[in-house]
Amino acid sequence: MRTVLLGFALFGVFWGAWGAALPAVQERAQVGDAAFGGALLLIGAGALASMRVTGLLLDRLGPWVAPVVVGCFGVCAAVTGFASSAVALAVALFLLGALSGAFDVVINTAAVRYEAVRGRPLMGGAHAAFSAAVVAASALTGLARGFGAGTPAIFAAVGVVICLAALPARALAAGAAGRVSGRASGRGGEQGSRAAWARWWPLLVFGGMCALANLVENAQQSWSARQLEVTLHSPPQVSGLGPSVFALATVSARLASQFLAGRGISPRATLVTGALLAAAGTAITALASGPVICLAGVAIAGLGTGVCAPTIIGVAGSGVPAAQRGATVSTVMTIAYLGFAAGPALVGLIAARLGLREALTAMAGAATLLAIAATAMPTRPRPTPQDPAHSSEPTQTHDPAIHEPAQTHDPAWSHEAARTFERSEISETTQIHGRGEGCEGACACCPD
């Protein structure tokens, strides 16, 4: 668990430093606004190109994918700070996007696998670690720039820290490699097509829901300050509070979701509540008559959107066999990234035509659609596929700090799917815990 949290925190450290140093990156590369904006699009292009591939590699190669990805990301992070021309910046940003997308898939797959194997919540706390690290690294980078540090020094320091975590990162993918069962791969004809569609359509739905969540989240991050400053005529010291308030609310929401998940609150209840809060907060932000009300709306939206994406990714990845988990998580995240990338641009297009209030109101509508879609989510992150009376896996010791309610049967899961899932989970637990690998001595299946 500590390795997973460290991975999310390091990811947040880079993006916090990146956001705070962005003006200095542009200045060092000596590019105008239009060229710099085009170069930034390459980050998204690189991420979209790498996410799905990374998931497939995790499923096939297992533990060695994570340290390679982490180490390469650290090197690329350090090199990016030295870009001093438009061409160098473009190449560096595409590689940075590809490796950051791969890093994102690695850490989210690791968090989902931890929840599936250990039966304990982690996604909320992991994403909270990322958000908190973004806030802290952003502030520290601002201080470093104030003392005269340039982008080479800042990103070299960040890159070294990330590279030092490359070797322990092998635990992020421990037990990830596996093979699809012969029964599943041997299906052909119409039955195989139906089976393939049955596997893919839930991922498309989860990905679309996560894209809606990212659409609203990034719209708030990118436009709340402008709503305060331009629409409500607030001074810069007030408008600058918008992104900060949103980030702090997001961290709080994710920590709360971690606590509530450990107390048996279902993902469906979490997601519906989060989406409704996001819709209400974004509507308040759009229609506010003053900065205080607007900031309150931003905070409410942060509380709502903060829990949506982690919950969706966790549910999507937990209900599949271990050998398909990397591909599943990467597929959902690839679709979801489209919403994240499109959010600021879509708000800008609507604002240019109708106004910023109307654009943010449209984002509130998107959050409402997410709340409606969330009502169809299973009440549990996954069914319990194994009967303790017949399972060969040792029984987990009771942790009084985390209440784990009994799982209810989900009729959407066939008996065959449940048996496949059981075999994969038992195999995965044996791979991780049977050798003491990736285990912190907190489970009954490993020696002290």
Image (spheres, rainbow, N blue to C red):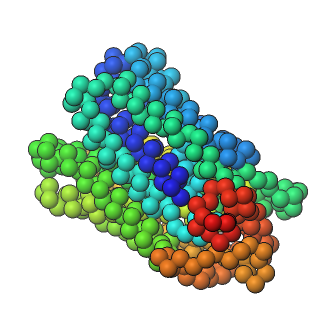
Image location of residue 417, percent across then percent down: 76, 70
Q: Position of residue 257 (x, y in %)?
A: 42, 68
Classify residue 56 as left or right of residue 195: left
421 relative to 216, above or below:
below
Determine which quarter of the picture holds residue 198. bottom right
Which quadrant would residue 119 be assigned to in this image? bottom right
The image shows residue 35, relative to residue 133, as above or below, that is: above
Q: Residue at x 38, y 52 (%)?
A: 131
Identify the residue shown where x is 55% and y is 69%: 120
Q: Quadrant of residue 365?
A: bottom left
Question: Quarter of the image containing the C terminus?
Answer: bottom right
Q: Is residue 294 left or right of residue 337?
A: left
Is 121 in front, or is 445? Answer: 445
Residue 376 horizontal/vertical position (percent) = 55, 72
- 200 or 421: nearer the viewer: 421
Q: Position of residue 197 (x, y in %)?
A: 73, 59
Which residue is rendered at x = 74% and y = 67% of the image? 426
* Side (left or right) of 163 relative to 421: left
Q: Is residue 347 visible?
A: no
Q: How many marks?
A: 0
- Examine the rendering and report whether any part of residue 228 can be seen: yes
Residue 288 falls left or right of residue 155: left
Q: Nearer the viewer, residue 385 or 71?
A: 71
